[in-house]
Amino acid sequence: MLGRAHRVTRADDFRTAVRRGRRAAQPHAVLYRLRSPSADPPRFGVIVSKQVGSAVVRNRVRRRVQAVCATAVSSIPVPAGDTIVIRALPGAGEVDWDTLRAEIDAGLRRVVTA
């Protein structure tokens, strides 16, 4: 689980990251990265729309993406102050855990190095 300091909570922060951030597309997710010069820890946000599936499926996808982000905080060198928003695409609810984790890890690595 992501700690409070590592979560995006405000709608304005989500909106700004999606509109102004660098984008990396994966088959089941789109990742956005917004750089910031602050010394705060990197923050992650997850967007899962109703197109992904029912509430049960959406919550499962959200929990899986948050778990990948929690491990990425320590394994992928995300610069301090960055905001990363992950938007799940409609097929994300039908994908198994390993595939979703591999895609998000690859997307995070791509968006962080860009």
Image: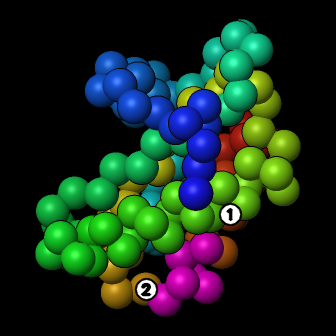
Q: Is residue 55 left or right of residue 108?
A: left
The span from disc 2 to disc 1 (Cα, nearest Å) is: 15 Å
> Going 61% across and 73% down the picture, which residue do you hit?
101
Residue at the extreme top? 37
- Name the mark on residue 95: 2
Question: Does residue 96 lie above or below 81 as drawn?
Answer: below
> Going 43% across and 86% down the picture, which residue do you hit?
95
Q: Is residue 60 magenta?
A: no
Of the pair 18 and 78, the residue shown nearer to us: 78
Magenta region: 96-101
Q: How is the image coloured?
A: rainbow
Q: Is residue 23 visible?
A: no
Q: Which residue is mark 1?
A: 105
Quarter containing the N terminus: bottom right
Q: Is residue 99 magenta?
A: yes
Q: Residues within 10 Å of mark 2 (few under 14, many from 20)?
A: few
